[in-house]
Image (cartoon, grey):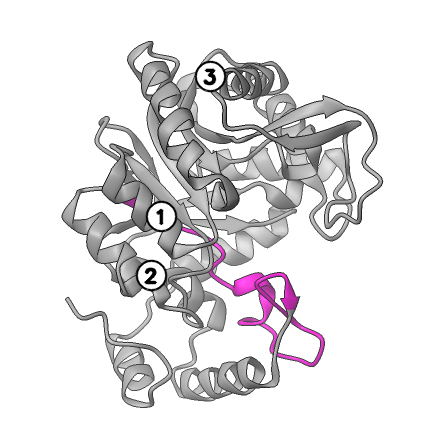
Amino acid sequence: MATHQDQVSFGRAGLTVSALGVGCAPLGGLFSSVSDQDVDELIARALDIGVTYFDTAPFYGHGSSERRIGKGLAKVPRSAFRLSTKVGRVLEPGQSTEPNEYVDLDPFIPVFDYTPSGIRRSFESSLERLGIDSIDILYIHDPDDYLDQAINEAYPELDKMRREGLISSIGVGTNLAEIGTRFVRETDIDVALVAGRFTVLDQIALDEFLPEAHRRDVSVLGAGVFNSGVLVNPVEGATYNYAPASQEILERTRAIHDAIAPYGVPVEAVGLQFPLRHPATKAVLTGVRTAAELDTNVKAFDTEVPEQLWTDLEDKGLIRPLGL
């Protein structure tokens, strides 16, 4: 069983990351505001307890997540942490007037751009906000509606950047398993982040994505493990993948809670550890906004989940067999 501070091999470039990483979308004010002090304390706490991998993106807070992380890591030796960010959107100066799930917005408007020049612009701007000169992992972000361009134009540019030593590893970051599958099959990516598609509530990644990633030695990063929160708190009004949870999802989640209860294991532990049941998944992200939230999830990640619990969930038809 992995513990949060274990250093695991991630991708083909010899890179290692902590088994539990910090997903930094909340640090851009996802759904609610976060103070700069909370961000600084979170980063300091993470490093202190061995959570040394941070994943961000220009889209998160329209630059505010990257900027805050850069500030929090400014005095930390570069060798003490691993950092990933994303490309696919260029931040243009301006104030967004569109409805937005982020509330701590920097004065930029994100514009999709998967051209080679757009990739370079996005990357160079990220380096400035982060205050560093190289990135460990660079993900092509949300290419759902630009898939052919992302594969045929963006990926070759990242491959060039990898050869130039600007990045160590290339990945794709998406919410759709089929997008991850195409990248695994058609490019030479090192890693893949498919959020919310191999969780206690959703195992569609078992159809093609995870078997293909495992076969081609592409390391997978588990993310979105609580499916926007409903797994932890299945109440009316809870969100499932950023939308109101249906009655079917609420009822199934409550049945999962009932099945877990006799084991005395927190549902957070089940959610965080579930992705690591598949050998393609090497590490897991947890999206947190305070040091206290991180401590809670670290404790859950390090809690032993009995193998019989997984068997019971399978026998009750609440999760799919891995099919290995």
**Residue 77, numbered label:** 3
Whether tag 3 and tag 1 are in contact, CB under 8 A, the answer is: no
Inter-mark Cα distance, 2 to 3? 36 Å
**Residue 251, numbered label:** none
Residue 119: x %, y % from top left: 50, 21
Whether tag 2 and tag 3 are in contact, CB under 8 A, the answer is: no
Inter-mark Cα distance, 3 to 1? 33 Å
Q: Is residue 105 above or below residue 222?
A: above
Residue 280: x %, y % from top left: 24, 51
Quadrant in which residue 239 is drawn: bottom right
Residue at coordinates 66% horizontally, 40% vertically from top-left? 27
Q: Residues within 10 Å of mark 1 (few under 14, many from 20)?
A: many
Q: Residues within 10 Å of mark 3 (few under 14, many from 20)?
A: few
Inter-mark Cα distance, 2 to 1? 9 Å
Nearer to us in this view, 41 or 213: 213
Residue at coordinates 37% horizontally, 15% vertically from top-left? 161
Residue 232: x %, y % from top left: 56, 71
Q: Is residue 177 above or below residue 154?
A: below
Q: Which residues are magenta?
A: 219-243
The residue pinned by badge 2 equals: 205
Inspect the image, locate mark 3, and give the three-letter code of the amino acid beneath it: Pro
> Dot 3: what SS?
loop
Inspect the image, locate mark 1, and give the three-letter code of the amino acid beneath it: Gly
Residue at coordinates 26% horizontally, 56% vertically from top-left? 210
The image quadrant where one finds the C terminus is: bottom left
**Residue 180, numbered label:** 1
Q: Residues within 10 Å of mark 2 (few under 14, many from 20)?
A: many
The image quadrant where one finds the N terminus is: bottom left
Query: Looking at the image, is mark 2 or mark 3 earlier in the sequence?
Result: 3
Residue 49: x %, y % from top left: 46, 40
Inspect the image, locate mark 2, and give the three-letter code of the amino acid beneath it: Ala
Residue at coordinates 80% horizontally, 27% vertically from top-left? 107
